[in-house]
Image (cartoon, rainbow, N blue to C red):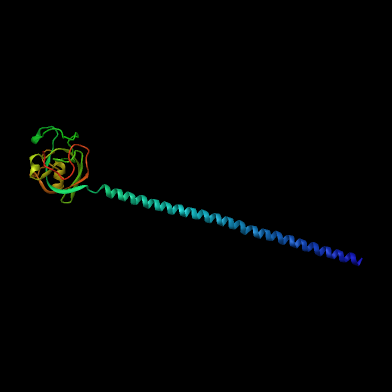
Amino acid sequence: MQQRAINVVLTGITGAAMAGMLVAGVAAASDDSAPSGDKRLLSQQAMNTQEHKTAHEGGRKDSKSTSKDSAKRTKKSSKALLAGKTTASYFWDDGSGVNGDTGAPAGGKPMQKGLFASPSWPLHTKVRVTYDGRSVTGFVGDRGPGSPSHRGVMLDLDTYTFRYLLDGEKPSSKYNAGTGEGHIKGVKWEVLKWGSGAGKRGAPRPLG
């Protein structure tokens, strides 16, 4: 009887101990698994954040690089290939016969604003002319002036460009600048792009 009571007590103690150990084990397992899951989640988030940061920085670098390349291209495209100064006259040849009009321009394009005549440069050469702070960009579309080119007049400008450079105004008609001035001294010219038409590159040369 006494021995049986002792056995019952021991069995109860052992069962309680095993139950306690089982609960502790489950709790421990639960505690260990939670941080592990959190660690994996945090690790994944950190990787995503790093990848986003890297991609963003790469994008900014690419953007800066593109902007820098664009600025270089713009600067290069606006640089003159050749520059100088000359005395400029004006003309308007459209086949009307007015003021010694000789007919259609030699370059094959109709007379227009921004069409200049050069005694030697290749036709369709892109040229910028500047005087007194005013500038006009045009192209060589005709030959001229004739004999004045032997006296240093190396550009013949259309009437509108001539009058605009002179005082910023418009001519009284396309055949007459309307100021009594036939020449502008000290006009700056800049060759921006050589044309593919007939002519010679380099410093302007007198006609013929």
Which image quarter holds the C terminus? top left
Q: Is residue 172 visible?
A: no
| Picture coordinates of residue 193, whole percent (x, y) | 23, 43
- Residue lying at 8% horizontally and 35% vertically, measured from the top left: 100
- Residue lying at 58% horizontally and 56% vertically, measured from the top left: 40
* Residue 108 picture quarter: top left
| 71 displayed left or right of 134 | right
Q: Residue furthest right?
A: 1
* Residue 23 picture quarter: bottom right
The front one of 46 and 16 is 46
| Picture coordinates of residue 72, whole percent (x, y) | 30, 50
Relative vertical location of residue 157 with respect to residue 64 in this rendering, above or below: above
| 12 displayed left or right of 71 | right
Q: Is residue 184 visible?
A: yes
Which image quarter holds the N terminus? bottom right
Report the number of numbered marks.
0
| Picture coordinates of residue 162, whole percent (x, y) | 14, 44
| Picture coordinates of residue 21, whole percent (x, y) | 74, 62
- Residue lying at 46% horizontally and 54% vertically, measured from the top left: 54
| 29 displayed left or right of 206 | right
